[in-house]
Image (cartoon, rainbow, N blue to C red):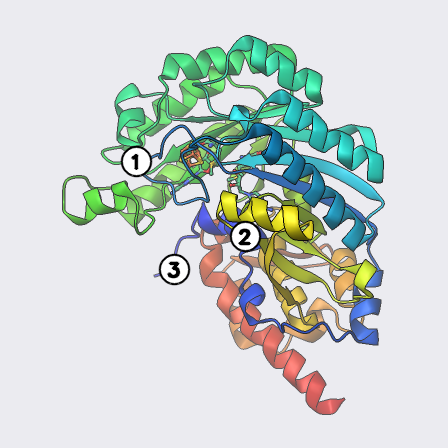
Amino acid sequence: MLKAVSRFRSTMGRCWYGSSGTRGKESSSGSELETATWGGSPSREATLYVHWPYCLRRCSYCNFNKYIPRGVSQTAMRACLERETETLLQLSQVSRITSVFFGGGTPSLAPPSTIAAVLETAARHTHLEGGAEVTLEVNPTPVGASTLRDFRLAGVNRFSIGVQSLHDEDLKVLGRDHSSEDAMRTLAEAQCLCPGRVSVDVIFGRPGQTVESWEMELEELLSVCDDHVSLYQLTLERGTHLFKQVQIGLLSTPGDGIMAQMYDSARRILGKQGFLQYEVSNFARQGAVSSHNINYWKGGQYLGVGPGAHGRFIPRQEGGVLREARIQTLEPDVWMKEVQHWGHGTRRKVSLSHLELLEEVLMMGLRLTEGVSHEHWRQFSPDADFQQVLGGSTEVQELQERGLLVLDDRGLRCSWEGLAVLDSLLPPLLLQLQMHSCQQGALG
Ligand SMILES: C[S@@+](CC[C@H](N)C(=O)[O-])C[C@H]1O[C@@H](n2cnc3c(N)ncnc32)[C@H](O)[C@@H]1O
Ligand SMILES: C[S@@+](CC[C@H](N)C(=O)[O-])C[C@H]1O[C@@H](n2cnc3c(N)ncnc32)[C@H](O)[C@@H]1O
Ligand code: SF4
């Protein structure tokens, strides 16, 4: 049986936990090939991700990098975020920031002046266009109308609201500290401030949920929401409270078949309401796609600032020519000390080989409904097109014959059915890519 695509972890997770990140080399010995490969894209451009690591409490399902604040110095935190932004901008020699995303944790707990300060720092050192997408993730509880307005004034022009569910009982199980009424109010306030640029995050596959109740809940949400919806299938993360509750039999989550039905019906309902699916978990109408997240899926450069933030960029100031995968120190107090001392809190950096870069382009790009176009692939792989790389694989051909994968004059993409089982399609594709790369190495 085909494995369903994990509609959460790999959706965003691979943006920065790329497999290649753990296999790359710690050195950064460049090669002509890498420079040429990456040279095809506008490498002086990047997006900026800023991680706010604090939350008011821990949701039962979440294993993101977050901490309950105890005596945080807002002044020091702000200074460190500004300093690290400056350092990474200089290191990358990026001249244009095309979007900024404040994620977390709960960045709506940050003082709006801190958000403004980071944006001003970015604008001081690079070209940050007036219309560039600037997203802030918002938890429906702690933020009042005036604060959302303050964030708007600070430069935020897109809000991503963590609604998660419209059922109060389920919100309790998830350990959320807001009600569905709070979520509705926050959503309405956000829509007044940024019409057409408000997104909602919803989790499905919750304990006790049925396909019918999910369909009704989604219909209700779509009657009030704006033009962007992100649907995440609940992932039971080891070490979380929810994981333990399920392990000891206190709660149970729907089985794979039900999860697949929930995903399928959600896609149909969203489609009927005019939402186009543009990625495994993301749907937009009126063209309200998130340009920041699309940059991850299209293999663009990004800088990651703040505790635990991930980045992918070429450190040009150091003479680097290979793209590096970077992760900043996780623990906020330690991260702050490092930034105060060194100007940045990069804990780990590995150079990505050409093959690793291509693997990322494929894994990330196939999450998009449009897939990877020939033109896009050529930017990273000028010497071997899809036919040359994948043509020799009977397994890949079989996926095409079964109608899961499409390779045509537009490029490589998943079919409707294929997108739902993307995790099963990737292994043969990656294997073929690796074999092709080995053959080329042997010939060269
Ligand atoms: C890490 S949170 C940060 C934003 C904000 N603190 C919030 O909770 O809305 C971003 C999104 O990740 C999703 N998420 C986190 N853990 C998840 C899990 N185990 N399974 C599915 N989705 C998850 C939630 O939908 C959440 O909106
Ligand atoms: C799950 S996504 C939700 C995006 C949202 N649905 C939207 O449309 O804007 C956002 C989360 O991914 C994580 N994230 C995104 N980019 C990151 C990066 N570069 N480094 C570390 N975490 C990142 C953060 O935890 C953030 O809260
Ligand atoms: S889901 Fe959001 S609010 Fe809940 S613990 Fe995770 S980051 Fe914090």
As drawn, 134 above or below 352: above
The local secondary structure at tag 1 comes to loop
* Residue where numbered disc 3 is placed: 2
Query: Which residue lies at the image location 70% right of the left edge and 33% below the top edge?
Result: 118
* Residue where numbered disc 1 is placed: 206
Structural crowding at the residue carrying mark 1, measured as other residues with C-alpha within 10 Å and reported as few (<14), some (14–19) or many (≥20):
many
As drawn, 382 above or below 160: below
* Residue where numbered disc 2 is placed: 329
Q: Position of residue 326 (x, y in %)?
A: 62, 57
Structural crowding at the residue carrying mark 3, measured as other residues with C-alpha within 10 Å and reported as few (<14), some (14–19) or many (≥20):
few
In this rendering, the label closer to the viewer, 1 or 3: 1
The local secondary structure at tag 2 comes to loop
The residues tagged by marks 1 and 2 sit, at their Cα atoms, a distance apart of 32 Å
The response on whether ligand 2 sits within 8 Å of label 2 is no
Identify which amino acid the numbered label 2 is placed on: Thr
| Number of callouts | 3
Query: Which residue lies at the image location 44% right of the left edge and 20% below the top edge?
Result: 221
Question: Relative to 374, is 50 on the left or the right?
Answer: left
The local secondary structure at tag 3 comes to loop
Identify which amino acid the numbered label 1 is placed on: Arg
